[in-house]
Image (tube, rainbow, N blue to C red):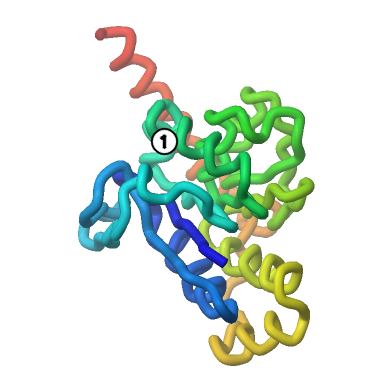
Amino acid sequence: MQIAILLYDRFTALDAVGPYELLGRLPGSETVFTAKERGPVRGDQGSLALVADRALDEVGSPDIVLVPGGPGSRAAMRDKTVTDWLKAVDATSAWTTSVCTGSLVLAGAGLLTGRRATTHWLAMDELRRFGVEATGERVVFDGRYVTAAGVSSGIDMALHLLGRVSGDFTAQSVQLLTEYDPQPPYDAGSPEKAPAEVVDYWRRRAEAGKDEKEAAAARG
């Protein structure tokens, strides 16, 4: 079984590495990082890069496709090379998956139209514009399409998928060996639980960023 993880400029590292650490332990599997060109691809913080060992045109029929999110997802979802590759491999993949705003890239390729899916809580409206039934659930299965909410939820998605692909024993073994037993010091991991002032602050920041981009586009 081949697992292909898409890389693009300014992806979020945990979106890719979290699922990689779990799915890569699937017995008999091979994990490949792929991008438009071979070589290092920088994450959204700029200080970390993952190496794409294969270009997109060298990965033709993966069994599992994973698209991470990140600030660069908006450019990736408009990149014809990326979306054409996604459409091509989706035709034969067993599972097509995403984490965070990676679902926007899948939606940009037309793969989620009319389907239930999730994304980062600040990107729900963007996802709906593609004709997707966006939901705030942490992990969403719609047939062979699996989407996860923001960043850390990719670990949960990978565990769900391990259970579907290889059974409960494998999934539970991977959870045990990675000691995935979250006990966070705060209960602020969703907009429903976080303090209102924190949620409002980040909504304003997101809206301000959107306005700046629209103003720059208007200026040409």
The image shows residue 145 at horizontal and vertical percentages of 69, 48
Residue that appears at 31% across and 42% down: 36
Report the amino acid beneath label 1: Val
Apparent side of residue 2 relative to residue 165 in the rendered image (left or right): left
The image shows residue 169 at horizontal and vertical percentages of 74, 86
Q: Secondary structure at mark 1?
A: helix
Which residue bears the numbered disc 1? 82
Residue that appears at 58% across and 68% down: 155
Quarter of the figure that contains the N terminus: bottom right
Residue 66 higher or lower than 179, as above or below = above
The image shows residue 20 at horizontal and vertical percentages of 48, 69
Q: Tell me the quarter of the picture where residue 172 sits.
A: bottom right
Residue that appears at 70% across and 56% down: 139
Q: Is residue 198 visible?
A: no
Apparent side of residue 142 relative to residue 9 in the rendered image (left or right): right
Q: Is residue 160 visible?
A: yes
Quarter of the figure that contains the C terminus: top left
How many discs mark residues in the rendered view? 1
Residue that appears at 63% across and 25% down: 130
Apparent side of residue 8 relative to residue 63 in the rendered image (left or right): left
The image shows residue 21 at horizontal and vertical percentages of 48, 75
Is residue 185 or residue 93 the one in the foreground?
93
Q: Tell me the quarter of the picture where residue 73 sits.
A: top left
